[in-house]
Amino acid sequence: MKPLADIERRLGEIEDGAAGHGAAAAAELLALGEEVLEHWVVAKGVEPTRETREGFRLLALHRQGCAGDPSFNACRETCRELVYHYNLVTGDPQHDAAAQRLLMMTMVANHLFLFVAGKMQVAELGDFCCASRPLRQDAAPLESA
Amino acid sequence: MSAVKDKYQKVAYYPGCALEGTAHSYNRSTQQLGKALGLELVEVKNWNCCGAMEVKNIDPKLQTYLSSRVMATAASEMNMDVVMAPCNGCYHNLKKAEYDLAHDPASAEVVDRLSKKAGHATYQAGQVETIHALDWIKQGIGEEGLKKRLRNSLQGLKVANYYGCMYTRPRHIFPEKDQGPGSESTSKPHFMDDLLAAAGAENVEFPLKTACCGGAHTLSDSDTSTKLVLNILRAAEAAGAEVIATECPTCHSGLEMHQVRAEKKYGQPTKVKIIYFTQLLGLALGLKPKQVGVHENISDSLAFLKEKGLA
């Protein structure tokens, strides 16, 4: 599992076109996506799954990352778009729009990276999305309790 | 006229807090669009905050109560059976409250207790139907109805439709979606695409239409929000879009503000314009830019719209 900074740098290289084209680059982007999700799963103290879902480990890792954390579903469609673009690029590498599809796939992979990296950063302070865990723990019982 | 179409001709309007503040142009354009289409909006009396993310994260049942009060007012005091919420956050929270009240007796007990304490009728699941502004136009007017009323085609306008993450998530609170032809999809939403295409726009293939804009990070971690937004803006431009059409005030203001911040902080300017779908449809119906609040957007699109013959 590469450090997140290395993944970010590699995504930049692929976007700049300096790191291969076509099916090979698409396969690498998919693998980078898996590594990003591995970071999240490992940070939660879980062994990353080797299983696949709908034929893709990325989707199985996403599902694993959602366990007990429904807000992680915010990147569900991003993961599915990554798989979709992988299929587009590898299914027809000679297509006229292959380069455009790879560019879009790179940006989707980058979004997954940014989302997970940001979420991990915030998770150090407490829970994702506005409320911090200390605030919740220390608060007096509320009206509805 | 179909039953649904008929039902959506007059709906209770729940603008929510954002539309009275940073998203005033969304409020203005939604109301103007309704008038232009002959759809009647009746604002929910004395409405309150839906509980947003802040209350929901600290006390989810309190959020359920707050959202239920809005629906209770519409149902019991206004005798309305449809509540339309243009804000994704409000729409999501009302749908979540509806789901909780139908499936969780503990939530229903809390809502009943707090409603009695506050002195208003307790909302019962199913009393109203909550819809988004997209449902309102799509089902209340439809593409064909829209085409008949067009005065300015959006032809030549390349649009990336951005729905944000709360319009379709989590799927279980939107039982009407994913019901086959004619219904909205939670995986690849298309209602905004359908409406803008009917108005003549060219929708580009945009893979980040439901991706997170970092709205929740805006205060706690602005840099992450800026990077997420920058990626969305760059992807839209790479997809060939001149405009990002929005339908959520949080996403919209996030895109606008972080577009400015991305240029200042990271030296990465983007040119894509950010415009509410209600503004675009209003312009297509012949409304003036000021009538739909183009001047109230941070993203200055007036010169661009003039160039396109829409202003």
Image (cartoon, grey):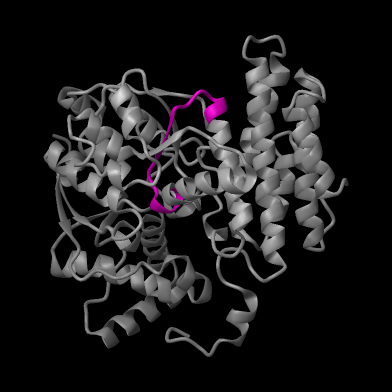
The residue depicted at 22 percent of the width and 56 percent of the height is: B13
Q: Quadrant location of residue A108?
A: top right
B75 to A8, vertically: above or below: below
Q: Quadrant location of residue B191?
A: top left
The residue depicted at 48 percent of the width and 70 percent of the height is: B54
| Relative side of B36 to A34, left or right | left
| Relative side of B187 to B39, left or right | right
Q: Please state the horizontal and vertical placement of residue A73, each as a whole percent of the image.
A: 60, 51
Q: Is residue B207 visible?
A: no
B198 to B224, vertically: above or below: above
Q: Is residue B285 visible?
A: yes
B306 to A45, vertically: above or below: above
The residue depicted at 52 percent of the width and 31 percent of the height is: B236
- Quadrant for the C terminus of chain B, please: top left
Q: Please state the horizontal and vertical placement of residue A86, each as a whole percent of the image.
A: 70, 27
The residue depicted at 82 percent of the width and 25 percent of the height is: A19
Q: Quadrant location of residue B129?
A: bottom left
Range drawn in magenta: B237-251
A116 to B302, vertically: above or below: below
Q: Is residue B217 magenta?
A: no
| Relative side of A6 to B206, left or right | right
- Quadrant for the N terminus of chain B, please: top left
Q: Please state the horizontal and vertical placement of residue B139, each as a whole percent of the image.
A: 25, 38
